[in-house]
Amino acid sequence: MSQQKNINFNGKDIIIKALDGVNIEDALNFKPTQNWFENMKLQKNLYLDELEFREVFYFGTKPGFVTWSCKVRDHNLSLEDYTLKYGSQNGYYLPGYVFCRGNSVSILPILSCKEDNTIYTALVEQARIPIGKESKLEIPAGILSDTDGNIKSAALDEIKQELDIKDLNLSNLVDLGSIYWGESVNKWTTSCGALDEHIISFAFHKNITKKWIHDTNGKLTGENNSGERIKVKIIRLDNLMFKSRDSKSLVSYLLYERLLKYKLIDKKLNKLGRPYPCSCNIT
């Protein structure tokens, strides 16, 4: 039997439900769920009438993913008025299935080797069960829903864990999106037809040697006890788009290339000049 409670949303009581076996409080208090509600409150032309939590997936004892279906309108018509206007009840509510996991970080390594005057990057190879693949090449990444909110620290932890690089600190991380789009709009969406996730694209620079490449390429990393088995792959940076068909990798590389083009950074991520103007101001 489903659970139910009423909450006040934008001055109106709405019904919140949860399927049998789903902890409604865990689902509702999940930080990415709260962020979704806050975003919805800011939308002037979206009206939330009802929501039903369908599943909570836990990382240990903490919620990691929450799914729900919701009834959201993009009009302020009653069902009767909508039917009179359009001749049918079809389309009264927008598609409203949500897979909520919160935001993520991705990290593009920029690796300079003076011995051959080449810039490399590091990819991680691992199985990705949702797409039915035993091997997927991508840049390092991690979710933020189970962190304390320190985004840079979460990104640094991912680098250390997945690439086994220890000699980095927070000052080495460059937020590519903040430079290109601005600090308040530095995130981008992945599959927003169903997923709430936004990604923040970081990069870092490190001087390396051929010996480092030899020692690191093919290295096994990750948290084996969590089922995370990762192999590091070192490739030339300019081969990234040929080697990885992963959105995080491609967007990060595009941001890096555009920032180079507009001379906002140099190849080693040193910041140059003033922020490039918004595209709406370019003539």
Image: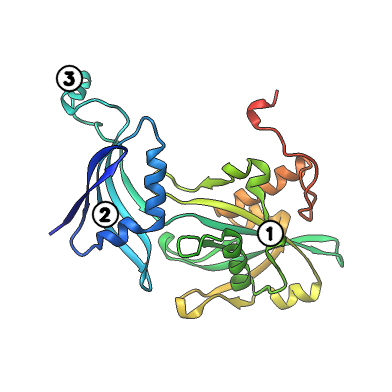
Q: Which residue is mark 3?
A: 84
Mark 3 and mark 1: span between their CA atoms?
56 Å
Nearer to the camera, 30 or 70: 30
Where disc 1 sits, the SS reads loop
Where disc 2 sits, the SS reads strand
Question: How is the model colour-coded?
Answer: rainbow
Q: Which residue is mark 1?
A: 173
Nearer to the camera, 276 or 243: 276
Q: Verify CB contact (< 8 Å) between mark 3 and mark 2.
A: no
**Corner quadrant of residue 179:** top right
Nearer to the camera, 34 or 165: 34
Under mark 3, the amino acid is Leu
Q: Which residue is mark 2?
A: 53
Where disc 3 sits, the SS reads helix
**Residue 61 sits above or below residue 202 on the image:** below
Left or right of 94 on screen, residue 144: right
Under mark 2, the amino acid is Phe
Q: Residue furthest bottom?
A: 225
Mark closer to the chain start, 3 or 1: 3
User: Residue 203: x percent and y percent?
Assistant: 67, 57
Under mark 1, the amino acid is Leu
Left or right of 150 on screen, residue 166: right
Mark closer to the chain start, 3 or 2: 2
- Where the N terminus falls, by quadrant? bottom left
